[in-house]
Amino acid sequence: MTASVAVLGALVLWGTLVGLDLVSVPQMMIARPLVAGAGAGLLLGDLGAGLAVGVVLELFQYAILPVGAVRYPEYGPATVAAVAVAQASGGMAAAGGGGDHGGVLALGLAVLVGLITGMAGGLSLHQLRRLNARVVHAADAALEAGDPTVLVRLHAAAIGRDAIRAALVTAFGLGLAWVARFAIGTLTARDLALLDSVAISAAFAAAATGLLRVVGTGTNLRWLAAGLVLGMLTAWLV
Amino acid sequence: MKPPLGASLLRLFAVQGSWNYERMLGLGVGVAEEPLLRDLRSGNRDGGSAYRAAVARAAHFFNAHPYLCGLVVGAAARAEHDGAPPEQVERLRRALCGPLGSIGDRLVWAGWLPLTSALTVAAVALGAGGRAVAGFLLVYNAGHVALRWWALRAGWRHGARVAVALHHPVIVRAQSLVGPLAAIAAGFCLPLAADWLAGPLPSWATTVAALLGAAGFIALLAAPRLTAQRLGLVLTAGALVIGVAWP
């Protein structure tokens, strides 16, 4: 990762906003890997890397249905870190290092960093929710008295805690990306291609099972099949 | 009286800000409902105790789809203004949890979101680049904001009889349409994304991806405890180890 301090700061800020968007505010879907990846790519001057990583992690995201109190990985800040890996590998290739297959290099390694960071993000969300419960429980008397100042203060403080959590997760992911940079230099084009193919295969397995769960086994399954045929035809024609 | 629906709507965007395992969305709903309850204070009924009691009730346990929380915020606030007994307001909140969660999940998480996201993935794969992502944000959020605003207004308009709003023809029609559309879009995007992502790979790596993808799909279906994330971690970490160890 050869990003300047200003770019690193911007990435942490973007990761924080993306992390906040997932649950706290405003849920406008900048937390989706596609959007988080495109934003990180723009900040790093490599939109292509951002989109490629974003699409792969978006496919992983399809396996998640965020209903009720279900626990799930957090792919927003994770995508920001993953894009940093992909962008760094591109820069190394331009400088004559790393592998040499076209498109985005080290996509698989970027996805590995993204998955680990996503796991850390998911764990941190669970801990935050437990902490919020303890804080709310401690303020039960004031809340039952209908004190609006306490209510708003508790709510705002929880959002602040989520912002700190998201910033820390992003920083952790960027740290992993920095470590991954050393691995890129030791891997050959064959190794990188193997990693890419494995990451892509896992992403499609995740997307297929996730979408199948969303679609169900009723009439919509036929619509899914129709869409598949249409997509294959379009891919063949274009 | 003109209710401050704008202030309430703004707060609704952060309705999950204090999500926790005890009251879930309760605090966020209370914060969003509070501006609509201020009239109870200025009316000085019971020296402001009606306002405080209503704020306390508003912050009790609540869980539903976040985009539809406006329905309970508006309806409960209206019921408080109409002088509904506290037990009725509590019953109303409890009764709305299930339907709002179920409708929101079907309409948004399993409908509008996969539909717009899959179309964006397809557009990126077809070369639309960053414009596709900008389009996704615009289109998705047009639906998102419209749903939040409709929910809040409908809740305030119908009050305790808010269940009527859930049978609004647009909501009913949207639920029946969005599922099939999302299914078509999901199916459409997968081959295009596969072609785009695997395009730069050498042919042997494409074969590896196809075989592992099929095996991974079967494994995820057959082993419910195996999550997509764990599968991805095991496969990519394994490939990294093989890459480093294999001369």
Image: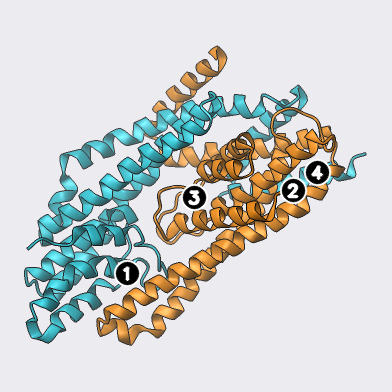
State the residue position of label 1: B26
Where residue B148 appears, as percent x and y from the top left, is 27, 51
Give the Cα distance between marks 3 and 1: 23 Å
Q: Amino acid at mark 3?
A: Ala
Q: Chain of mark 2?
A: A
Residue A138, located in which quarter of the rendered image?
A: bottom left
The front one of A33 and B193 is A33
State the residue position of label 2: A2
State the residue position of label 4: A184
Q: Are marks 2 and 4 on the same chain?
A: yes
Instruction: Give the residue drawn at x 54%, y 46%.
Output: A36
- Colour assigned to chain A in the rendering is orange
Instruction: Pick out the residue farthest to the top.
Output: A237
State the residue position of label 3: A31
Give the Cα distance between marks 1 and 4: 47 Å
The mark total stands at 4
Q: Chain of mark 1?
A: B
